[in-house]
Image (cartoon, helix red, strand yellow):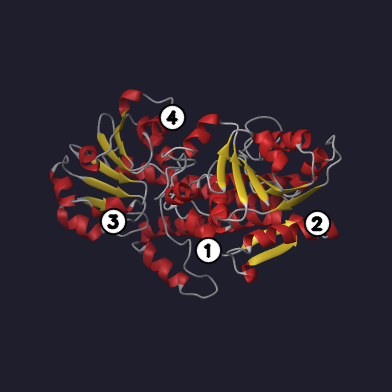
Amino acid sequence: MKICSMGAGYVGGPTMVVIAEQCPDIDVVVTDVNADRIAAWNSDHLPVYEPGLNSIVQAIRGRNLFFSTDIDEAIKTSDIIFLSVNTPTKSHGEGAGKASDLKFIESAVRRIAEVADTDKIIVEKSTIPVRTAEKIRRILESNAHKCRFEVLSNPEFMAEGTAIQDLKCPDRILIGGDMTDTGKKAVKTLVNVYAHWVPRNKIITQHLWSTELSKLAANAFLAQRISSINAFSALCEKSGADIDEIAIAIGADARIGPHFLKSSVGFGGSCFKKDLLNLVYLCEHFKLFEVAHYWNQVIEMNEYQKHRFSQFIVEKLFDTLNGKKIAVFGFAFKKDTDDTRETPAITVCQDLLKEKAQLFICDPKVSEKAIKDDLKGFDDNLIHVVDDPYKAAQGAHAIVVLTDWEAFKNLNYAQIFSSMKRPAFLFDGRNLLNLQQLTQLGFEAYGVGKPRF
C-alpha cells in the first residue's frame, strides 16, 4: 500500500511521520506546493517543532517516509490520499470572518481529479465544514479516467506540543464514510492502517456527516471550558478567591473532570477560534441564531480575557507605559511549539505597543522574523527580540509571562529582581510561577484569578 498527504504542515507532516513509523510495510509520501517547506523536511531543520518529531524523521526518512514536491506522481501511485491542506477563515465574500475558506481543499481535489488514473480513497484530514464531502465528490466525479473515489472523514485530534504522543497513543481515531458496500470497504481499509498500532476499541467508525461535525464539536466544547474558567477568574480577582482552588473543586466532580480548567490570559492556536467561527457561521446558515450567539460568546469571552489582562498591566503601571521597558516571556500560544497562530501574545503585545511600551520579547522557539511579522504595523523601534530572559528583564519595569515554557519556571528571579526598575512588577498570564515566593523577593506579582500575597 502507498499513502500520500497533500500538505506538509502541522497536520500532514507529523501525522504521516507517525503512520510511516508505525507501518513499515506502507510507503508514505508527504507532498506540498511549497518547495522550501519540503526542503526543510528533507534537512536537519524541520519546518515544524514538536518534541520527538525530529528523531523519528531522521530515523526513517528514506526508508518508507519521503518528502516531495512531485505531487502528481504521489497522486498517481497512492492508494490513499490525505487532504491535509490549510482551511483558513475566509477574509472576503460570503461568510467573511467566519466561514472556512476551502480554496486549498478545492485546488487539491481538482488536481486529484485531473491526475488520478486509478481508484483512490480520499481522506479529509483538514478541519472542514459538515457536508464538505459532497463538494469533494462533485469535483472528483468529473475526472477524465472514470475512476471511482471514496471520500472518508478522519479528523485529527492532536494538540501542538504533544502531537507525537497524541498520534502514537490517541484517545480515539474517528473514521466516517458512506454506509454503502464500497464506503464500508474504504473505511475498513483505513481502519486497518491505524490498527497497526491503535487498539481496535479506540477506532470509532460512523457516518460521514457525524465525523465531519465531530471535530468542530470537540474544539467548541474544549474552548467553552477555557472561556468558562476564565470568566470565573475575573470574579476571583474581585472577590479574593483563588481560581486554581476553584478549578480543583470543580474538577473533582466526576461529571465535569479536571481537564481544560487552567485559567490563563486566553486560548490560542490555529483551531479553537477558527473552528468556533466556522460553527457560528454554520448555525447562522441553518438559521439557528440563538445557537450561533451561544458559541460566539465563547469567542467574545476569550477576547475579553486578553484585553482585560492588558488593561490590568497598564493600570498597575500607573496608567502609562510610554517609554517603559516591558520584558515579555514567551510568544508561542503554548509551550513546546513554535506556532504563534492566534497566540494571546499578539493581542497583549499589540495593546502594550499602542501604549508606546518598549517590548523585549524572549521565546525559546519562536524566531525574530515570526514575532515581527505578527506585530507588523507597529513601530519597529519598540519591538526587541532577545534570546536571553535575563537580558530582556534587565532594567525593565515589568515582566509579562505569556507562554508556559518550563524554562521560565527555573530562572533565578532574585537575580532578575535585582536588575529591574523599582517597583518591579510581574504579570503571570499563565499562572506558571509561585507568586508568593516572587512577592517575598520584592516583586509586585499578579496572576490570573489569583489573590495577592
Q: What amino acid is labelled 3 in the image?
A: Leu
Badge 3, how many Cα within 10 Å: few under 14, some, many 20+? many
In space, the residues marked 3 and 1 are separated at their CA atoms by 30 Å
Q: Secondary structure at mark 1?
A: loop
The residue labelled by disc 1 is 169
Q: Secondary structure at mark 4?
A: helix
* Residue 151 placement (x, y as % from top left): 76, 49
In space, the residues marked 3 and 4 are separated at their CA atoms by 29 Å
Query: Depth-wise, is mark 3 or mark 2 nearer the camera?
Result: 2
The residue labelled by disc 2 is 183
Q: What amino acid is labelled 4 in the image?
A: Asp
Going from N to C along the chain, the mark reached first, 4 or 2, is 2
The residue labelled by disc 3 is 433
In space, the residues marked 1 and 4 are separated at their CA atoms by 35 Å
Badge 4, how many Cα within 10 Å: few under 14, some, many 20+? few
Q: What amino acid is labelled 1 in the image?
A: Cys
The residue labelled by disc 4 is 373
Q: What amino acid is labelled 2 in the image?
A: Gly
Q: Is residue 285 visible?
A: yes
In space, the residues marked 3 and 2 are separated at their CA atoms by 52 Å
Q: Secondary structure at mark 3?
A: loop
**Which residue is nearer to you in this view: 297 or 169?**
169
Q: Secondary structure at mark 2?
A: helix
Q: Which mark is residue 435?
A: none
Going from N to C along the chain, the mark reached first, 1 or 4, is 1
State if disc 4 and disc 1 touch (CB < 8 Å): no
Going from N to C along the chain, the mark reached first, 2 or 1, is 1
Badge 1, how many Cα within 10 Å: few under 14, some, many 20+? some
| Side of 133 relative to 262 (left or right) | right
Badge 2, how many Cα within 10 Å: few under 14, some, many 20+? many
